[in-house]
Image (tube, rainbow, N blue to C red):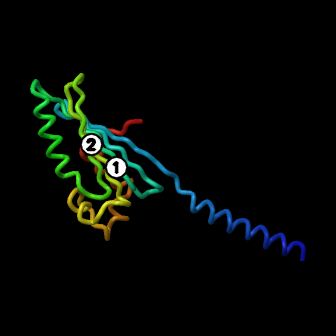
Amino acid sequence: MKNFKRIISAMLFMVVAVVVLAGCQQDQTRTFTRTKDDNTVTNTLYAHGDDVYKIRSIDKIKLDENSSSAFNMIKKSIEKNNKGKGITIKVTQDKKNKEIVVTQTIDFDKISSKNLNKYFDVDLKNKKKDLKIKKMIKNLKDQGYKEVK
């Protein structure tokens, strides 16, 4: 009888351990960058387990002499399109380095299906399949991005 209780206790402990460990998915952040024509784009993927829940993109656009008018034009255009839950776009000017910095954050848990289809080739029905970290990393690498370690 004592052995039976020990066996049952050990089995119950193992079941609880498996359930607890299965629920402990690792959060991960992966950053990729690409420079082309003096413009640098840095994309950071935020994932819980295999599912990407947010992307932050920082675009640094080099400017020539007339940077103020270009900055105002780009900022006005972007602010006009900065409407939608789950999407945040911020435009700043770095006068020292003569560049415009556009920071975009897309939160896939908050974005509407209309905006998701507008900015990405992702359908909410396939969201879980399309927003896997391995698939997004492959897409970034195929576009020439290098991972920042």
What whole-number distance in Å separates the C-alpha atoms at marks 1 and 2? 14 Å
Would you say residue 35 is visible in this rendering?
Answer: no
Q: Is residue 65 above or below residue 13?
A: above
Image quadrant holding the N terminus, namely bottom right
> Going 34% across and 49% down the picture, which residue do you hit?
55
Element on which disc 2 rests: strand
Hey, what amino acid is under mark 2? Lys
Element on which disc 1 rests: strand
> Going 37% across and 48% down the picture, which residue do you hit?
45
**Does residue 134 appear left or right of residue 8 in this picture?**
left
Residue reaching furthest to the right: 2
Query: Quick one: label 2, few (<14), some, or many (20+) residues within 10 Å?
Result: some
Q: Nearer the viewer, residue 120 or 135?
A: 120
Image quadrant holding the C terminus, namely top left
Q: Is residue 127 above or below residue 59?
A: below
Q: Percent x, y for residue 106?
A: 32, 52
**Does residue 14 appear left or right of residue 32 in this picture?**
right
Q: Percent x, y for residue 59?
A: 25, 38
> Going 38% across and 36% down the picture, which residue do you hit?
148
Q: Is residue 71 above or below residue 109?
A: above
Identify the disc placed on residue 90: 2
Q: Which residue is mark 1?
A: 55
Hey, what amino acid is under mark 1? Ile
> Going 74% across and 70% down the picture, which residue do you hit?
11
Q: Which quadrant holds residue 74?
A: top left
Q: Which quadrant holds residue 94?
A: top left
Residue reaching furthest to the bottom: 1
Would you say residue 134 is visible in this rendering?
Answer: yes
Q: Nearer the viewer, residue 61 or 47?
A: 61
Q: Depth-wise, is mark 1 or mark 2 nearer the camera?
A: 2
Q: Percent x, y for residue 5?
A: 84, 73
Which sits earlier in the primary sequence, circle 1 or circle 2? 1
